[in-house]
């Protein structure tokens, strides 16, 4: 029988477990049993005027005082073994003087089982059984009761010890399962927090991308158009009496456009967060894919890391061009090609959708409006 789990509950200490109340009850019962058996020896020696009653009474008191002192000290290791050996010697002296000391053997069984490692715990039980049988026979002669009583007591003590050990194993298993559940719950909570953080980050990135796209497609393009219209008006009517105000309005629009572009620049494109430029373009094309449009990103040459403002500008240009293709070109295929040359980087966006009149690009601002 393995006494290691039993040692955890020895004397005053108690390992916390789901069955701790059961262990505490068994422990208290063992202490009460030892005290009661010692009291029986003391009282029978005093009340029945037994031979050697004074030494028996003194040894009984010494045994129980030493037992309680050991409980209060919670000794382990060598000190515990010395304490156990001292209690055994006092008990042997009681057995030499009084046959009633054989009752204390039942308490000694539990002490040996709880405090000694195997196989010494079982050897201790056998030793106590032999002492009780031989001591009783020395005082009262050999009898069946004198032999069977201690043997049955030893068997009962071992059976109780085995039951105690089984309870401890069950409690340890429950504690292990409980710890595993706690760890699983902690992992689930941690995973949930990580997912929530990722969702928040994704939401922030999506909102930044939406804001940058909206500002680029609405405010920035509107200001650019206003600036071009005012420039065309200046060229169309150089002698207009409100020319100064037109010029001031164009400068104001230019300043606002510059501030808007600075704002867009501060909102670094979400597509670039944690990604290379090629990966960002691939993500843009992936987002543009639909049942009616197939978009792909192509990288030519050896990719190199560009300054962030340059990469951000390329990404915004690609976002704007791809957005225009998706909304206006009615295209079914689109290719975004990023080409790395030794001294330059180029971005080509080609689709098979509706085009526009190229000659419009050759006109001046005044001719276009």
Image: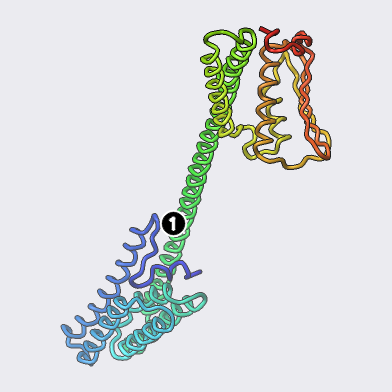
- Point out residue 20 in the picture as x, y percentages from the top left corner: 36, 59
Q: Is residue 213 above or below residue 90?
A: above
- Point out residue 325 in the picture as x, y percentages from the top left corner: 71, 16
Task: Please name whichever residue, 268 or 147, is drawn nearer the observer in this view of the structure.
Answer: 268
Q: Specify whether 187 is left or right of 68.
A: right
Q: How is the image coloured?
A: rainbow
- Point out residue 154 in the picture as x, y percentages from the top left corner: 41, 73
Within-10-Å neighbours for mark 1: few <14, some 14–19, many 20+: some
- Looking at the image, which residue is at 59% across and 34% down? 268
Q: Which residue is mark 1?
A: 171
Q: Is residue 11 above or below residue 343?
A: below
Query: Which quarter of the figure has residue 269?
Result: top right
Q: Is residue 122 above or below residue 328?
A: below
Whether residue 103 is visible here, answered yes or no, is: no
- Point out residue 26 in the picture as x, y percentages from the top left corner: 34, 64
| Image quadrant occupied by the C terminus | top right
Count of all numbered marks drawn on residues in the image: 1
Query: Which quarter of the figure has residue 258?
Result: top right
Whether residue 268 is visible here, answered yes or no, is: yes
- Looking at the image, which residue is at 35% across and 73% down? 11
Query: Which quarter of the figure has residue 286?
Result: top right
Task: Please name whichever residue, 281 or 241, is drawn nearer the observer in this view of the structure.
Answer: 241
Secondary structure beneath disc 1?
A: helix
């Amino acid at each position: 029988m393995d006494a290691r789990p039993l040692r955890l509950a020895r004397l005053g200490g108690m390992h916390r477990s789901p069955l701790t109340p059961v262990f505490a009850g068994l422990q208290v019962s063992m202490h009460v049993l030892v005290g009661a058996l010692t009291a029986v020896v003391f009282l029978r020696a005093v009340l029945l005027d037994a031979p050697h009653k004074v030494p028996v009474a003194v040894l009984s008191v010494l045994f129980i005082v030493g037992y309680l002192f050991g409980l209060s000290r919670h000794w382990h290791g060598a000190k515990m073994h010395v304490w156990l050996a001292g209690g055994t010697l006092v008990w042997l002296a009681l057995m030499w003087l009084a046959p009633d000391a054989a009752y204390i053997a039942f308490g000694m069984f539990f002490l040996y089982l709880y405090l000694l490692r195997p196989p010494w715990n079982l050897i201790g039980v056998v030793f106590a059984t032999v002492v009780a049988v031989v001591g009783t026979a020395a005082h009262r002669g050999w009898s069946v009761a004198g032999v069977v009583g201690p043997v049955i007591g030893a068997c009962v003590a071992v059976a109780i010890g085995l039951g105690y050990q089984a309870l401890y194993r069950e409690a340890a298993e429950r504690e292990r399962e409980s710890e595993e559940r706690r760890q699983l719950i902690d992992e689930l909570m941690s995973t949930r927090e990580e997912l929530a953080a990722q969702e928040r980050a994704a939401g922030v990135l999506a909102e930044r991308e939406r804001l940058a796209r909206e500002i680029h497609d609405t405010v920035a393009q509107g200001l650019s158009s206003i600036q071009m219209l005012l420039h065309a008006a200046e060229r169309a009517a150089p002698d207009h009496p409100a020319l100064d105000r037109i010029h001031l309005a164009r400068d104001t629009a230019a300043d606002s456009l510059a501030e808007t572009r600075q704002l867009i620049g501060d909102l670094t494109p979400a597509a670039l967060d944690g990604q290379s430029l090629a990966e960002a373009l691939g993500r843009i094309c992936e987002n543009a894919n639909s049942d009616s449009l197939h978009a792909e990103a192509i990288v030519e040459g050896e990719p190199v890391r560009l300054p962030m403002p340059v990469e951000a500008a390329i990404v915004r240009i690609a976002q704007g061009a791809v957005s225009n293709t998706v909304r206006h070109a009615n295209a079914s295929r689109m290719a975004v090609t990023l080409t790395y040359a030794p001294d330059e980087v180029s971005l080509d966006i080609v689709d098979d959708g509706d085009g526009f009149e190229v000659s419009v690009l050759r006109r001046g601002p005044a001719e276009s409006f």
